[in-house]
Image (cartoon, helix red, strand yellow):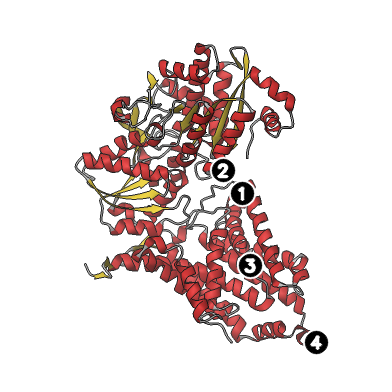
Amino acid sequence: MKFSSKKTWLALAVSLGLGATMTANAGNEVVIGDIDDMSGLYADVIGQGGVEAVKMAISDFGPTVLGKKIVFISADHQNKPDVGSSKFREWADKNELNMLLGGSNTGVSLAMAKVAGEKKVPFIAIGAAGASLTNQDCNAYIVHYAYDTTALANGTASVITKEGGKSWYFLTADYAFGTQLQDAATKVVNANGGKSIGSVRVPLSASDFSSFLLQAQGSKAQVLGLSNAGNDFTNSLKAANEFGITKTMKPAALLAFISDIHSLGLQTAQGLYLTTGWYWDLNPDTRAFGKRYFEKMKKEPTMNQAAYYSATLAYLNAVKAAKTTDSDKVMQELHKIKINDMFVKGGYIRADGVMVHDMYVMQVKKPADSQYPWDYYKVIKTMPGEEAFGPLSDSTCPLVVKK
Amino acid sequence: MTDLFGFPVPVILGQLMLGLVNGCFYAMLSLGLAVIFGLLGVVNFAHGAFYMLGAYGTWALLNFLGIGYWGALILSPLIVGCLGIVIERTMLKRLTQIDPLYGLLLTFGLSLIAEGFIREGFGASGQTYPVPELLQGAVNVGFMILPIYRVWVIVASLTVCLITWFVIERTRLGSTLRAATENPQLVQAFGINVPLMVSLTYAAGVALAAFAGVLSAPIIQVSPLMGSSLVIVVFAVVVIGGMGSIMGAILSGLLLGIVEGFTKVLYPEASNIVVFVIMAIVLCWRPNGLFGKG
């Protein structure tokens, strides 16, 4: 468990029931929480970088909103749904948590989404790709920021299938995220005249991918759909290179981050297609944010870390506009506003909770084409939000389905 | 293309090859366990942690001291071996007269401590280690593209296993060692420093685990839990081979690696448990293990 400031130690004291006087003060504060993978396979994707991004957002907004001090607390969910949901419940009960940012693991986020509905605390999910968060598992307090499995599949899978990659074999992380991503990609592949000829499910954080990759190669499919993320993605791609599998199959990164590409190196990653909601080198605004973040973290931010910044600002702006921290009123405001910042232009939160915005299909540059540090992507296609996330009428969220 | 059991032969051969590589790791680790159990009577549950420390040692030597793979291949097992001596001298030694269960509990606790420290210091997500330049690339062996590094793993580990077997079963040093475990007082009476021998044996056993850790660093993620996920399987391998049997540990390690690889083709879902199914069968049929005496 990692806590980020003295204030959070006080918050911890409160949660332990040691500082009874603190609870009385909590009404004078707006408490933003972050429960994310701080030490596991997804820690580089958000982790401490996300914590830093939220702090940047709070200091940019000003230390207070509606005259109340903005307090930020964070914790590690260790990729365990029970750890994430019980921490959330504890903060909601004892710290008067006003909003939760939660990251990186669909399984954990689904568990926390239930708590959000139960405790009526807005929950902004970032990095958990599973689209079920805004479909069958949705509730009125969920906002799904940055991307979901639908948008990822509509990007990468559609571009590769249209380019002639008709037969797919999936290497899938064996939990809610991996299977939802595979299902979404299969749908897109089928719709574009291709087909999925098989898949192998790999346990999360597997140490060796080689035998799974040989199974994929044995299938004789043209495309190797990597339905995983974080270190699982980089390890499986590395092993695919080592075993010469990338010579016979075209790898498709269904979810990859700039941190992954950085650790793989352009030599290994070149030519890879991927879908992202944000890239530091898109326009002057993104570059300015990238530069500020880089000064603190010595890395360019991933789209999720940028989304953490954007989501924190969006929430605080909604509180300011609603003139209250009352969850229902803030949610109402969030559904009303247009989000314009360094992350999105004209983004909006739909009735089912999806934050709709443009997505980009990128191709990783060849080492020779990379002009400066972190110059990794070439934009292949800009997908308007509606195309990426699909129409609202497709949503199976009970809040929008007409009975 | 020719098929076997309805699967293309190249797929089966490929998985068997990977199984053999895994089998080499099982063999090296179970060999260390068998040596320690055979000569000290200690069920060394910390074996997985020593394997993990060997891999982290390799990574740390490169990243903090700039010492590359070949240096680490010698240094890392040496460092871990010294750590083994310290543990044997200060802790395990006190437990020799009592129930082996205490040794198991102690070493289990030690492995939890080691994992905790490494997780706190270097994070849970693990580190990557590059394949040494000399062993990069791959050869096409017909049925698969085989990375040269994996060939090296097979060669290096089989060599080390055979040397260990030879030293224990075929040399004077080995026979003294075996005699010392049968009757320490008598051997001591011949002027041989038995406690020193015991310490060195423990060190050699854990150095073997660290050596396996060095070999594994370039192919699997160097992570705090890499040892504990392996050690359970390795214990099963030792049980199948016969507790304390040196050759049994080597052969059953290789054999089970291959069986596991084969299972990955036939019925992948069972590949994680096939070793334990075999263990159950062997225990019913030959309670002393395949190569056990008595």
**Eyeballing the image, is A223 above or below A354?**
below
Q: From the viewer's perspective, is A219 left or right of B203? A: left
The kind of residue tagged 1 is: Arg
Is A374 rendered above or below residue B74?
above
Q: Which quadrant of the rendered structure holds the N terminus of chain A? A: top right
Local secondary structure at mark 2: loop
Local SS, label 4: helix
Q: Nearer the viewer, residue B125 or B137?
A: B125
Identity of the amino acid at label 3? Answer: Val
- Residue tagged by mark 1? B119
For label 2, the crowd category at 10 Å Cα-Cα, with few meaning under 14, some 14 to 19 and many 20 or more, is many
Tag 3 and tag 2, C-beta contact below 8 Å:
no
Disc 2: host chain: A
| Residue A164: percent from left, percent from top | 21, 43
Residue found at the far left of this picture: A193
What amino acid type should be assigned to the residue bearing mark 4?
Answer: Ala
Q: Which mark is residue A39?
A: 2
The residue depicted at 72 percent of the width and 75 percent of the height is B198
Q: Give coordinates of residue A304: x percent, y percent.
A: 46, 32
> Pointer 4: residues within 10 angstroms few (<14), some, or many (20+)?
few
Which residue bears the numbered disc 3? B206
